[in-house]
Amino acid sequence: MSPFADLSYTKKQKNEVEMVAFIFRLIMTTIAVVISAYYIPGLEIKDLTDAIIFGIILGFINAFIRPIISFLTLPITMLTLGLFALVINAFTFWLASEISYGVHILTIAGAFWGGGIVWIVSIFANIFVKSNKLI
């Protein structure tokens, strides 16, 4: 049982908890991007600041653009039994790299594997946040 399970938050406390959860996810995404760039050929990062900016941009793309793309490509995703979601994932990763100036994707494999690693790390970060009842 989580120590946060029985707490009832005021609105200000809830906002603070949500901000901590956001910062935790941002840190996890940044770490995943840096590790991906180290191990995956075709993915380059200038410095840590650029990786943090990339993580913020990727978060916004995943929050606002990805749901629209997922809805529009739902028939294709269903026909491929969900495998097209990997293509959407690589596309959003590539799009974030095009918007940010410090992360460069040189190959399609770099976008695919980098997006996949960040996706897996994000799943674990979300499970951690939700299992501790932070949100």
Image (cartoon, grey):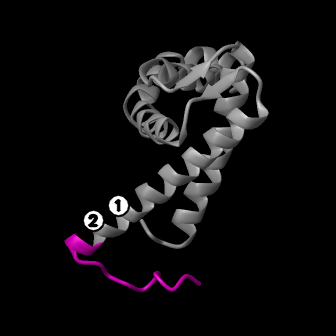
Q: Tag 1's secondary structure?
A: helix
Q: Is residue 115 left or right of residue 53?
A: right
Q: Main secondary structure of the magenta part?
A: loop
Is residue 34 shown above or below 124?
A: above
- Could one spot residue 115 in this view of the protein? yes
Magenta residue span: 1-13
**Numbered circle sitting on residue 15:** 2
In the rendered image, the vertical position of residue 111 relative to residue 125, given as above or below: above
Query: Is residue 19 shown left or right of residue 132?
Result: left
Amino acid type of the residue tagged 1 in the rendering = Met
* Whole-number angstrom distance, CA of label 2 to CA of label 1: 6 Å
Residue drawn at (68%, 16%) of the image: 79
Quadrant hosting residue 86 = top right
- Label of residue 19 in the image: 1
Could you tell me residue 11's position as x and y percent?
Answer: 21, 71
Q: Would residue 83 be seen by someone viewing this image from the given angle? A: no
Q: Residue at x 71, y 22 (%)?
A: 110
Answer above or below: position of 129 versus 68. Answer: below
* Residue displayed at 52% across by 38% down: 51
Amino acid type, label 2: Asn
Of 123 and 68, nearer the camera is 123
Q: Nearer the viewer, residue 109 or 129?
A: 109
Is label 2 in contact with label 1 (beta carbons under 8 Å)?
yes
| The quadrant where residue 103 appears | top right
